[in-house]
Image (spheres, rainbow, N blue to C red):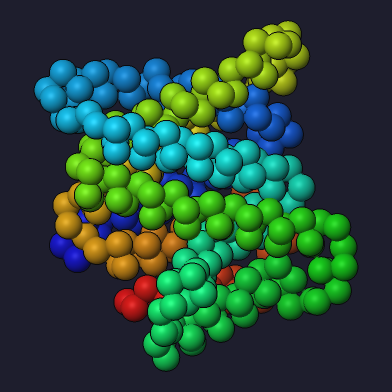
Amino acid sequence: MPVESLLLVVLAACLHATWNLLAKRAASVGPVFVAAYNAVACLVYVPWVVVLLLQGAVTWSWAIAGALLLSGLIHLAYSLCLQQGYRQADLSVVYPVARGTGPMLSTLGAVLLLGETPTGPALAGLGLVVIGIGLIATDGDLSRLRRPEGRAGLRWGTTTGGLIAAYTATDAYTVKVLGVAPVVLDWFSNLLRFLLLAPLVIADPRRAQAAMRGRWRLAIGVGVLSPLSYILVLAALAEGAPLGLVAPMREMSMMVGALMGMLILREPVGPRRLVGCAVLIGGVVLLSGG
């Protein structure tokens, strides 16, 4: 991987963990917060998108329109699941479990649906991912899985991870095969999410306004950083960086997210949970053949 692509992915990982910290702080707002930060993203990045469209950066076709629609729908489900997970469980559980589950489910899908034969490193990676997720979810205490918050973190993290696997494959195809500029793809995805969530705000604007009181700075932060972190990853892919290396490299954000949960949100992150993050990262690297 070129050094420039490597730096893009590392920066993206740090920005990704940061915006998830901001989203966690607004977890109680739910879909209204998702609509708010998608509106911010649309406004902030529209000048860039307009310039690219005027320059003819996109050669429109039904395939591109369908890919943008599919991406927006998957990202909407991902955003809502993530916000619900942060409402019910700790950032230091939901975030790394979600980031680690995606590659694991991608590998299992290739084996079960496509009939691929897993390699030795891939099997070892699956085992490490399962162990890492277990350590993160329980912090070494299996009795935590009997508690509602323990099961919630694992359940929502795993669901979110499945959606991560889905949108990663869809968006990589849109950028690398269909040639859509990363910022254009992300902008239309944000626009679709906002349009689908707008009726929630319009139905009761006073309630939405009350819910967002004191949280607009968080929405602005997420609206700026979330697209930027993903655009950097898509830009690395567009420059020729292999998906099999980009995917595990960006998962270093799991450790950053766990540390943010411990140091900033004061979540109870024990040493076993941090070890679980390291084990999970190692498993993802093996799954990707890196």
**Quick check: can you spot residue 146?**
yes
Query: x and y percent of residue 10 in the render?
Result: 33, 56
Residue drawn at the location 69% of the way across and 37% of the way down: 27
Query: x and y percent of residue 268 in the render?
Result: 73, 61
Marks counted in the figure total 0
Residue drawn at the location 70% of the way across and 62% of the way down: 154
Say left or right for 286 vs 7. Answer: right
Compare residues 94 and 22 and report the one nearer the observer.
94
- Rendered position, 176 above or below 60: below
- Rendered position, 18 above or below 54: below
Residue drawn at the location 17% of the way across and 30% of the way down: 59
Compare residues 75 and 277 and report the one nearer the observer.
75
- Rendered position, 57 above or below 251: above
Compare residues 96 and 119 and report the one nearer the observer.
119
Query: x and y percent of residue 280 in the render?
Result: 53, 73
**Quick check: can you spot residue 92?**
no
Q: Quadrant of residue 274?
A: bottom right
Say left or right for 165 vs 90. Answer: left
Quadrant of the rendering where the C terminus is positioned: bottom left
Q: Which residue is farthest left?
A: 55
Quadrant of the rendering where the N terminus is positioned: bottom left
Q: Which residue is farthest bottom?
A: 120
Query: x and y percent of residue 223 in the render?
Result: 46, 29
Residue drawn at the location 42% of the way across and 91% of the way down: 120
Say left or right for 123 vs 141. Answer: left
